[in-house]
Amino acid sequence: MKKSLKAFSMLLSVITLLTSVTVVSVGAVEQERVIDSLPNITQYTTPLGENVYNDENTGFQYTYAGTVENSDGSKLDVLVWYGSLEDQICMEKYGDYLVFSPGTTGADKGIFFVATDEGIFRMCEVCNERYPDMDRVYAVMKSNDKTYPYISLFGDADSNGVVNIKDATHIQKYIAGIDSQQRYIYSYKKVIDVNGDRIVDIKDVTELQYKILG
């Protein structure tokens, strides 16, 4: 009986130790944000409990959406401009992805920004010039409640992150007037306008089928 109690006590100690190590590990991962290491950035919490980063150089304020680790080991933070939005829709195409920004920040187009070890940039500046792993940017934005409606894989009609024959079927349903997955994508028509002629018709279905076949 004593041996059993001793063994149980040792097992409990091991479990406690592993649990404490896990907690410390998770906490460390949560602190690994690129923006935290940048100069002239201060952080405060709003009365609603939202953490906001303030850029003292520009006066812009951001909320954090997630960190992307690229295949080359570099990291970047996806940021959302914190402030009131104007009724204007901006769209940027990055390879096979479409990003919709529902507003403007003064003269700067779009509300999505990226923090790198060199500073904070508009997403279009970083994605067009340095081109990070957009599939990983996509995964981070899709996992955040502020950004998930605003990024889509071009032609991904069912918004599942993969372009296949099912998407061609969804586009056919749209053309026939049958409700598809429009509520899951910010600008459904632009996502499924595969040939970019601003008209969704059978030509887009054919174009997508060619794309799937390579």
Image (cartoon, rainbow, N blue to C red):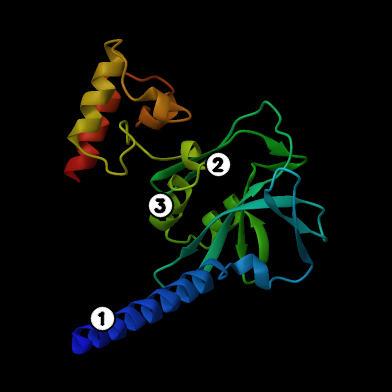
Label 1 crowding class (10 Å Cα cut-off): few <14, some 14-19, many 20+? few
Q: Amino acid at mark 3?
A: Ala
The amino acid beneath tag 1 is Phe
Q: Residue at x 23, y 29 (%)?
A: 168
Residue 206 appearing in the image: no
Q: Nearer the viewer, mark 1 or mark 2?
A: 1
Instruction: Return the residue nearer the eye: 124 or 41.
Output: 41
Q: Secondary structure at mark 2?
A: loop
Could you give the CA–CA distance between mark 3 and mark 1, rounded to whole angstroms? 43 Å
Residue 17: percent from left, percent from top = 39, 81
In this figure, what is the number of numbered marks?
A: 3
Say above or below: 169 vs 48.
above
Above or below: residue 207 compared with residue 27:
above
**Quadrant where the N terminus is found in the figure:** bottom left
Image vertical order of residue 191 relative to residue 24, above or below:
above
Residue 178 seen in render: yes
User: In the image, residue 191 lies at what x, y percent?
Assistant: 40, 32
Residue receiving disc 1: 8
| Distance Cα–Cα, label 2 vs label 3 | 13 Å
Three-letter amino acid code of the residue under disc 2 = Lys
Category of crowding for the residue at label 3, using alpha-carbon neighbours closer than 10 angstroms: few (below 14), some (14–19), many (at least 20): some
Disc 2 residue crowd, few under 14, some 14–19, many 20+, Cα 10 Å: some
Give the residue at mark 2: 146
Quarter residue 77 falls in: bottom right
Check disc 3 and report the residue beneath it. Answer: 139
Q: Which residue occupies 32% across, 31% down? A: 157
